[in-house]
Image: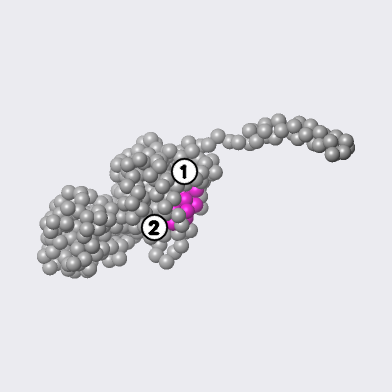
Amino acid sequence: MSLSRLKNLALCAIILGGLQAPLAALAQSSAKPLTKVSFRLDWKAGGQHAPFYLGKARGFYAAEGIDLAIIGGSGSSDSVKQLGAGAVDLALVDALVMVQAAEQGVPIKSFAVYYQRTPIVMLSPKAKPLTDPKQLLAGAKIGSKRASATYQGLTALLAVNNIDIKKVNLVDIGFGVQPLLVGQVDALMGFTMNEVIEAESAGMAVTELSIADYGVNAYGLTLASNEKFLRSSPEVVRAFMRATRRAVEASASDSAGAIQAVAAAASETDSTREAKVLAKTLPFWSAKGVPVSAFGAQTLQGWQQTVETAQRVGLVEKAPAAQDLFASGLDK
């Protein structure tokens, strides 16, 4: 190697060395601390929550400046209380519970819809299926847990199909599908991503009657926050939505990776079961015939239909205005 080339290399080394410190300082000064955001689920971690865990594992939230803390839930009513008190920033809340909360003056709003329609179904043995609400007038025994979301779903199904609940043979049961498996009831109310999977895992092939296909027009789970947080931190909410939409699309294209993320965060996860839960959940992230990239959309009409359903079920006496239930422009 020539002497001149050695001198040039040495000069480059000196220049690069001199630049290292300023570049490192610049990178350090431009790095901003992540904003801590607490997010409460509607229930314990499962396949239906895969996008949040996948988004956190793959750094989608961090890339948007969010340090997301995912907290297991114990029902939408508890989430409403947590949001109303400002104990958590964001939460998954059932839309009908949102309507109740609005009537009670709890200061929360939906900023995006997680389930575009209700996932409540009536399941019956495939060997003796119930495929039409009118069959309920023929004496079939229908199992449901009173005061539960699925009981509300049944009440709404009967109301919109002009069926007198007093003419239906209702059996008050606990949670789980055992009453169906042993023939105590001819059908029972449940969620497509829960009781249906339980029954099939126990060896019973079932037929599903979706209440959304028979006139019950209501949103399912929503992404909600305290009104104060929505006013003070709209950019954080938008950042959360960008990351979540990215995670939803990734979960749809890589379900195995999504379930791995859930299992890594919750050691008790039954990955085989939760993979089935995720598969059942996918269709609810967008309206029928609409790509999953439209995740989160909510409309005044959709909320009006949800309010009307809440009235039919008797969840509210004085219906709140639909426009007061959601914040627009934050799902982008």
Residue 297 placement (x, y as % from top left): 44, 57
CB contact under 8 Å: marks 1 and 2: no
Q: Is residue 247 magenta?
A: yes
Q: Residues within 10 Å of mark 1 (few under 14, many from 20)?
A: many
Residue wearing tag 2 = 282
Residue at mark 1: 56
Q: Residue at x 14, y 52 (%)?
A: 172
Residue 132 percent across, percent down from the top left:
22, 69
User: For the residues marked 1 and 2, what is the alpha-carbon distance in whole angstroms?
Assistant: 19 Å
Q: Quadrant of the rendered structure where residue 31 is? A: top right
- Disc 1 marks a residue whose amino acid type is Lys
Can the viewer see residue 190 in this picture? no
Can you say which quadrant of the picture contains the N terminus? top right
Question: Who is closer to the viewer here, 275 or 60?
Answer: 275
By secondary structure, the bulk of the magenta-drawn segment is best described as: helix
Residue stretch in magenta: 243-252
Looking at the picture, which amino acid does disc 2 mark? Leu
Identify the residue at horizontal 12%, vertical 59% (top origin). Answer: 183
Residue 312 pos. (x, y %): 25, 58
Label 1: element kind = helix
What kind of element bears circle 2? helix
Q: In percent of the image, x 29 and y 44: which residue is there?
A: 75
What sort of colour scheme is used for the picture? one colour
Residue 143 on the magenta segment: no
What residue is shown at x 12% (from left), y 68% (from top)?
A: 138
